[in-house]
Amino acid sequence: MILVYSCWTLPEAYIVKNRLEAEGIPAIVQNENLNSVLGEIPITYQTTPQVWIVNEDDLERAEEILSQSVAMEDEELEDEEKESAESGFSGENE
């Protein structure tokens, strides 16, 4: 197994896992139960939710899928920021 993604929240980890599995790449989420003891243990890279792929042969494809997903999210965020700017809404309290 190979670690391909680490994140702060369990829902985010499952979104990534489901995205990979939709493309035929078996994946699992590790550290999903550690959220219940955060505060008792330090929050580190090793204690946050992680997505691992089962087959090493899928690594290149998984990385490509994840990079495309991040690029799409960045474009959506830019579009939202542009729409907010055009509407005059700054998102700040006035």
Image (spheres, grey):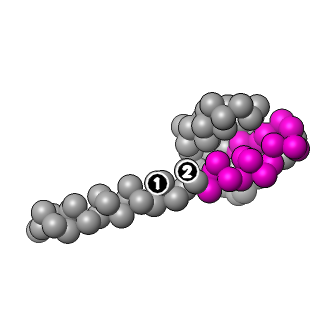
The answer to whether residue 31 of the structure is visible from this angle is no
Residue at 52% in and 59% down: 71
Q: Amino acid at mark 1?
A: Glu
Left or right, residue 22 beside residue 24:
left
What secondary structure characterizes most of the magenta part?
helix
Q: Which mark identifies residue 73?
A: 1
Left or right, residue 18 beside residue 88:
right
Query: Is label 1 in contact with label 2 (beta carbons under 8 Å)?
Result: yes
Give the magenta part as a residue range. 50-67
Which of the 4 image quarters holds residue 78?
A: bottom left
Quadrant containing the C terminus is bottom left
Q: Which mark identifies residue 69?
A: 2
Residue 21 in the image, given as x and y percentages of width and height = 67, 31
Q: Amino acid at mark 2?
A: Ser
71 vs 36, nearest the viewer: 71
Between marks 1 and 2, how big is the CA–CA gap?
A: 6 Å
